[in-house]
Image (cartoon, rainbow, N blue to C red):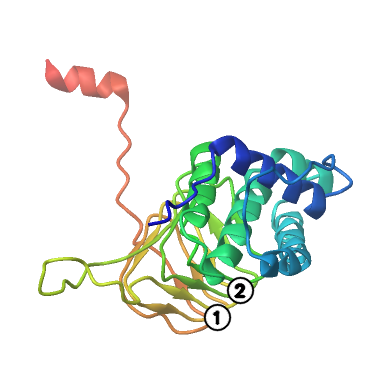
Amino acid sequence: MEVEKIPTIGQLKQFVAHVQGVVFPDYYAQVAVPEGLDLPEAFWHELPSIAQLVNTDVDAVLHNDPAVTDRGEVILSYPLPFAMIHYRVAHALHLLGVPRIPRMLTELAHSRTGIDIHPAAQIGDYFCIDHGTGVVIGETAIIGSHVVLYQGVTLGAKNFEYDEQGRPIDIPRHPILEDRVTVYSNTSILGRVTIGHDTVIGGNVWLTQDIPANSIVLQSTPEIRIKDKGTRKKDKK
């Protein structure tokens, strides 16, 4: 029985460095492909398309963040390009049936950026994550074009179905976000629900239902009580 050849973390990091040099040649030096890393030939034909997609993600940050000065700032200092290179490479390898490596790649990005994207998730072009920490995108999530997510957003499963042996069944269970959806910080969208195009979901929302296109979803404003500290001390006497 042939033993599966699992790449080292060093090999994967060198591989990503090579891809960075291809995707952003003006900002990263060319690095050789690591020896011993066996990838399908078809992947290398996909690399120009991956580069194009990641560059649309950079453009999305430029369009959505007024704090950005130029492309170089996004490429060299923002977490999104790093996370999306890992994800888009991992997704291509996943579609080609490569085991282990796709998940290892996305976990490398997760550990550095706090952005957790399953390699099987489907994400369109011009994808923007602002800040990024705590973002979770599940395996069967589908995201359209020009979608913006803020920190702490979860696109997760509401519950699981199990087979006769008690094992969870791998079925579509994560949200679908259509084109031009914006989801603000710390919102959880759970289950196989569809968020219609051109919709804005406010922060701190727990959402488990379909939302029609061109909607705005907001949490009810909580009651805010403001008391003077001096008054509170007097009340205790």
| Residue indicated by mark 1 | 197
Closest to the observer, 147 or 4: 4
* Marks 1 and 2, the one that precedes in the sequence: 2
The picture quadrant where one finds residue 112 is top right
Whether tag 1 and tag 2 are in contact, CB under 8 A, the answer is yes
Question: The residue under label 2 is which amino acid type?
Answer: Arg
Closest to the observer, 87 or 227: 87
Find numbered disc 1 in the image and state the secondary structure of the residue it sits on: loop
Question: The residue under label 1 is which amino acid type?
Answer: His
The picture quadrant where one finds residue 1 is bottom left
Please tell me whether residue 172 is drawn above or below residue 183 in the rendered image.
below
Please tell me whether residue 34 is drawn above or below residue 56 in the rendered image.
above
Query: Which numbered circle lies on residue 180?
Result: 2
Closest to the observer, 180 or 122: 122
Please tell me whether residue 235 is drawn above or below residue 142 in the rendered image.
above
Residue 172 at what x, y percent from top left?
Answer: 35, 76
Q: Is residue 204 visible?
A: yes
Image point 71% across, 38% down: which residue?
A: 77
85 lies left or right of 68? left
Q: Is residue 70 visible?
A: no
Residue 120 at what x, y percent from top left?
Answer: 48, 66
Farthest residue in the top direction? 237
Closest to the observer, 160 or 132: 160
Crowdedness near tag 1: few (<14), some (14–19) or many (≥20) residues, C-alpha within 10 Å: many
